[in-house]
Amino acid sequence: MTDFYKLLSENVYPGRGIALGRSADGQRAVMVYFIMGRSENSRNRVFETTEDGIRTRAFDESKMTDPSLIIYHPVRVLGQTTIVTNGDQTDTIRDFLAQGKSFEDALRTREFEPDGPNWTSRISGLVAGDGSYKLSILKAADPAGSACDRYTFEYAGLNGVGHFISTYETDGSPLPAFHGEPRAISFGNETAGELAQKVWAALNKDNKVSLFVRTIELTSGKTDTAIINKHQEG
């Protein structure tokens, strides 16, 4: 099991990251999503709540140069299912689920982001009402971005256990895609706010932008949510 906070603190730039799992007492599903940025355009963002989740928004509209890959709804809720992704595939997954289709069906229609030479991977997660969860990564099959490889990982949900995936393995030029299986991590019984503070402290201070943490009571569906935006700290 990987130490989640050590993993984050030792990685200057994992890009965007998703961690899903279950609290140590088994009572709550746990969800973490963060975004980081190296350019002014990427750093010029905040998370704000919506009726069914959150969206990204430009902190300073006058400095936004290209919204195409950085403005989207990272989290949407459909019934007892919560979807979290690093792009507009959130909407694709929600629409497919609403039609009775699957998470995998939706992602077969998408691929990595068209931002060569990085070809940023699309990472997605789904938390079901019973606390089970899925993680997916769509990544370039080669440096030319000529094809897309799709990987999906499905977890029953064990007490105190989670899994983490990110867009990049670390910093670089071009940025190297995350590789291998999602990292197994541990969760305690923290509130959303307590967990958010620990994750935020572990993220690189120069590159971190926004963080969303939610816990979901598996019996009642009641949620506890924390959002931290670098532009709005204090």
Image: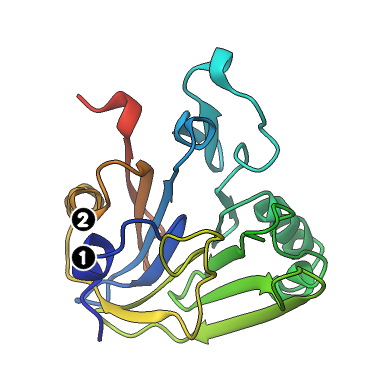
Residue closer to the observer: 131 or 44: 44
The quarter of the picture where residue 57 lies is top right
Residue name at image x 55 percent, y 67 percent: 126
Residue closer to the observer: 39 or 35: 39
The quarter of the picture where residue 47 lies is top left
- The outermost residue toward the top is 62
* Residue that carries the numbered disc 2 in the rendered image: 202
The quarter of the picture where residue 85 lies is bottom right
How crowded is the residue under tag 1: few (<14 C-alpha within 10 Å), some, or many (20+)?
A: some
Name the kind of residue labelled 1 in the image: Tyr
Q: Position of residue 143 (x, y in %)?
A: 69, 72
Q: Position of residue 170 (x, y in %)?
A: 41, 65
The numbered dot on residue 5 is 1
Q: Secondary structure at mark 2?
A: helix
Name the kind of residue labelled 2 in the image: Ala
C-beta proximity under 8 Å, tags 1 and 2: yes
Q: Left or right: where does residue 226 sit relative to residue 39?
A: left
Residue name at image x 62 percent, y 41 percent: 72
How crowded is the residue under tag 2: few (<14 C-alpha within 10 Å), some, or many (20+)?
A: some
Residue name at image x 47 percent, y 79 percent: 132
The numbered dot on residue 161 is none
Q: Is residue 120 above or below residue 230?
A: below
Q: Is residue 141 above or below residue 211?
A: below
Q: Secondary structure at mark 1?
A: helix
* Rendered-image quadrant of the C terminus: top left
Q: Position of residue 210 (x, y in %)?
A: 38, 41
* Rendered-image quadrant of the N terminus: bottom left
Q: Left or right: where does residue 105 sit relative to residue 180?
A: right
Q: Position of residue 186 (x, y in %)?
A: 24, 77
